[in-house]
Image: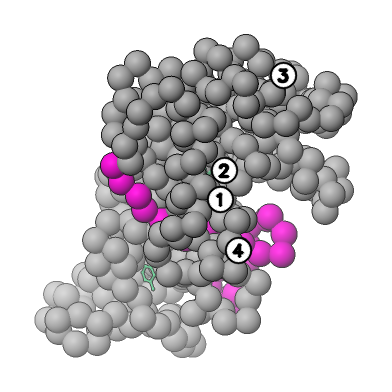
Amino acid sequence: MSYWEDKWFKNYDFAVIGGGIVGCFTALKLIQERPNARIAIFERGLFPSGASTKNAGFACYGSLTELESDRKHLNDDDVKALVKLRYDGLHLLRNTLEDKEISYQENGGFELFMKPPDEIETRINKMNALLYPIFKENVFSQENKRIESNGFAKNKLSTLLKNKFEGSIDTGKMMWSLHEKVRKKGIALFTSTNIENFKEQRNSIVLEVQSELGLIEIKTKKLAICTNAFSKKWFPKGDINPGRGMVLITKPISNLKINGCFHYHQGYHYFRNIDNRVLIGGGRQLDMEKENTSVFGINDNIKKVLIDDLKNYILPNTPFEIEKEWSGIMAFGANKLPLVKRYSSRIVVGIRLGGMGVAIGSIVGNKTAEILLEEL
Ligand SMILES: Cc1cc2nc3c(=O)[nH]c(=O)nc-3n(C[C@H](O)[C@H](O)[C@H](O)COP(=O)(O)OP(=O)(O)OC[C@H]3O[C@@H](n4cnc5c(N)ncnc54)[C@H](O)[C@@H]3O)c2cc1C
């Protein structure tokens, strides 16, 4: 290593491991609060290669049945806190990047029911009352006429609910814009850089990176760990469980009528229109044992169910071809709250975003940075 390399590339005030949505927001908050600090993000992929570039791009708060299911495990205040986190997170995302930088479209979020749900009006009213303090308006309404206008199988679907506050983004564009913003702010962004290990010393932390020059040690005064589902290696006993999610996308379909973001089966399955293609994903609850993994891959049984859903319910009269499929890894814990906490006096973790990282990634990053900046 030269004197110059040592002086300029190997020492930082703050380092962030992970270049996904959380890592970027952590670094942006740090530079906002400490404009003269030397900050670096280390991302192991050539470009961000975690869930932030694999997801479906739903900007959502939770479908009616998903929130009802949460209500069975959480008290009402905790359910509201969960929705408020998503609400604040999406606002922060849209205040940080312009809507055109993420292709934000507020076309509404919808939940589909195959069988007629019991007492649906009463349930809608109850949930609207619970969420009123956050949205200051009713959130859910029944809009069954959209079953036909979206071209769905009207004889196989009974009910469609709308959440008018939900929208969608182009998730790749969001990450592109975030990386652009990070670089413009003078934050160093190293990709293809796998942090193999970190060691705490008295006044600093040493990050170990394998390179063509051998093992390089990078020093930082403080460290944020934003590696979400890939964090088990740092915290083998932590409450962090990986969960794989699958996505399929069709070739472009002419005259595609689908407009908005759709959920069914308590939010486990979802689909939307992107660039006149149908993106469909989810279904991990069908094979939890195999899907609780951090290994990328396609589960053929789940894929078959998703394709059957396209044929039977979503595109009943429209021929389609699947063009591409991929998987991404999420992180789950005993509850749905993210894990944002101090690991030591110099290290903070911001991880475990479940299936809602588009909505809460910004807030989790901000909070991670705030804790890191606290004077002890
Ligand atoms: C299929 C799928 C669909 C989803 N759909 C939605 C949706 O529609 N709406 C929504 O709100 N959320 C959705 N999510 C969830 C959302 O994508 C995640 O919660 C969010 O992206 C997590 O962001 P993150 O920055 O915490 O993690 P990640 O994006 O996973 O970032 C972690 C980064 O750390 C890097 N890394 C790991 N280890 C190291 C190391 N040792 N050294 C250097 N770098 C390392 C990884 O390469 C990765 O880029 C979905 C997720 C999946 C998988």
Mark 1 — residue? Answer: 283
Judged by depth in the image, the label closer to the viewer, 2 or 3, is 2
Q: Position of residue 68 (x, y in %)?
A: 79, 40
> Where is the C terminus found, in terms of image quarters?
bottom right
Mark 4 — residue? Answer: 288
- Report the amino acid beneath label 1: Gly
Is disc 2 surrounded by few (<14), some (14 to 19) or many (20+) residues within 10 Å?
some
- Report how far apart the C-alphas of labels 3 and 1 lie in the structure: 25 Å
- Report how far apart the C-alphas of labels 4 and 2 lie in the structure: 14 Å
Residues shaded magenta = 323-351
Task: State which tag comes first along the sequence, 4 or 3.
Answer: 3
Residue at image coords 68%, 31%? 113
Task: State which tag comes first along the sequence, 2 or 3.
Answer: 3
Mark 3 — residue? Answer: 141
- Report how far apart the C-alphas of labels 4 and 1 lie in the structure: 9 Å
- Report the amino acid beneath label 2: His
Describe residue 147's horizontal placement relative to residue 77 as left or right.
Answer: left
Task: State which tag comes first along the sequence, 4 or 2.
Answer: 2
Residue at image coords 59%, 35%? 263
